[in-house]
Amino acid sequence: MSEIDLSNYVVQVSGVSKKFKDLKALKELSFSVEKATCLGLLGPNGSGKTTMMKILYGKTLRDNPQVSQVSVFGYDPTTNELEIKYLSGIVPQEDNLDAELSVWQNLVIYSRFYGLSKKDYLPRLNYLLNFMELQPKRDSKIRELSGGMRRRLIIARALINSPRLLILDEPTTGLDPQVRHVIWEKLRLLKKEGVSILLTTHYMEEAFQICDKLIILHKGEKILEGEPNFLIEKNIEKYVLEILNLDHFEKVERKISVPRVEKTGNCYFIYSNDLEKLKQIRDKFSAGDSYLRQSNLEDLFLKITGRQLGD
């Protein structure tokens, strides 16, 4: 194995494109992941998030590798796929556990892929079961586990080799809030231990809670990049008034100069930096017909990528 890149970046991507027949999944995407930080890739379905993840660990080949760059610990996945997998942990979208085996057996088999002896894997696997709060289910068959337990087991499996980079593709999709919060806490602990994380998610709260930096993708292109709070502060108004009853909204709109408005279905979203202006509009509606709050990452995401399916 060649020498590992010891710079401050564990992942460096420059000018990466990928085309599937007539679909351009990625268009000259560039980004980097620093040590012991979490980078989140956000975007609607089909924006290129999973394609980029698969390029990083060699499951998908990028177009024109001679004019683009992908470096993971100094390795290019087109030629050093195994070296990257040896240093990384991968949590795919799909549940690919062996349903016929127990929790323990799934972990043991995976540990053998890394050449771990029984002496080495016994303490490691017990540690991971405790870390992911799965020790009571050690001998349970996979089919007996809940969705949240399966997801935690897949994350535990990805940590067997003590990876320096953890790649998570929508790790908490479909899980209840309690399980999501448990996983978030574990990811924060891993960052403190020096693990770098690359995450895709559709949960805006998840991205805000865990990620040090975000990239918003749309139709294969990078639209925005930066720290979550910075992106919100610089790219969207501070407050939003949600109008839930539209019966007399148009009459109100004619009487008052309304700030920026977005509409979806039967709801209006009125954005402004002027809190008093929004309060003035809110007071013209009955209690329960409106909701005034601070803008958040989801508001920014919808502003950038569109509220309607297919936008």
Image (spheres, helix red, strand yellow):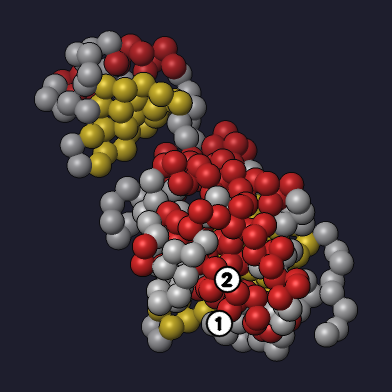
The residue at the point 39 percent across, 51 percent down is 175
Q: Quadrant of the C terminus?
A: bottom left
Q: Mark 1 falls on what kind of element?
A: loop
Q: Amino acid at mark 2?
A: Leu
Q: Is label 1 or label 2 in front?
A: 2
Q: Position of residue 42 (x, y in %)?
A: 50, 55
Q: Quadrant of the N terminus?
A: bottom right
Nearest the viewer among 180 and 16 is 180
From this view, report whether residue 177 is shown above or below residue 116: above
The residue at the point 65 percent across, 81 percent down is 112
Q: Which mark is residue 139?
A: none
The residue at the point 60 percent across, 67 percent down is 158
In contact (CB < 8 Å): disc 1 and disc 2: no
The residue at the point 78 percent across, 62 percent down is 9
**Residue 288 lies in quadrant:** top left
From this view, report whether residue 22 is shown above or below residue 258: below
Q: Is residue 71 left or right of residue 49?
A: right
Which residue bears the numbered disc 1? Answer: 59
Nearest the viewer among 42 and 126 is 126
Neighbor class of circle 2 (other Cα within 10 Å; few <14, some 14-19, many 20+) is: many
**Residue 160 lies in quadrant:** bottom right
Q: Do we see residue 127 in this rendering? A: yes
Nearest the viewer among 49 and 111 is 111
From this view, report whether residue 141 is shown above or below residue 110: above
Q: Is residue 267 left or right of residue 186?
A: left
Q: Which mark is residue 107?
A: 2
